[in-house]
Image (spheres, grey):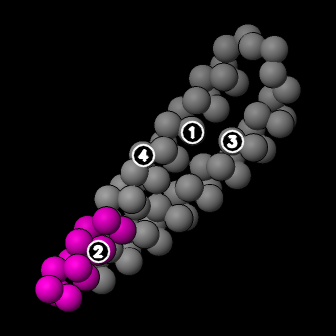
Amino acid sequence: MVKNDNTSRKALYEEAGKYLLDVSKLIFGGVILAGVMNLNVDKLVLFIVGGISVVLSAILGFVLFKKGKE
């Protein structure tokens, strides 16, 4: 029973890691699209906030994915 709980926890970490990596890719795409389009947005703030969000979600995604693979 304990082994099954540990297996499901690892699977959960792995799936959460994949999800965060996908979110990171979507944020990156959104930042690029918003930068290309002529929207009324400060591009410096867009790229700083978007870049920080991409990096943080990617790092957390890799950490969770690695924790799920252990």
* Amino acid type for the residue under numbered disc 2: Lys
Density class for disc 4 (Cα within 10 Å; few <14, some 14-19, many ≥20) is: some
How far apart are the two marked residues, 3 and 1, measured between alpha carbons? 7 Å
Numbered disc total: 4
Q: Position of residue 7 (x, y in %)?
A: 21, 77
Q: Which residue is mark 1?
A: 28
Hey, which residue is sitting farthest top in the picture? 38
The crowding category of the residue bearing disc 2, from other C-alpha atoms within 10 Å (few below 14, some 14 to 19, many at least 20), is: some
Q: Which mark is residue 50?
A: 3
Left/right placement of residue 36 relative to residue 58 reads: right
Q: Earlier in the sequence, mark 4 or mark 1?
A: 4
Tell me the amino acid under the disc marked 1: Phe
- Secondary structure beneath dot 4 equals helix
Q: Is residue 10 left or right of residue 25?
A: left
> Closer to us: mark 2 or mark 1?
2
Q: Which residues are magenta?
A: 1-13
Q: Are the residues at dot 4 and dot 1 in contact (C-beta closer than 8 Å)? A: no
Residue ID for mark 4:
22
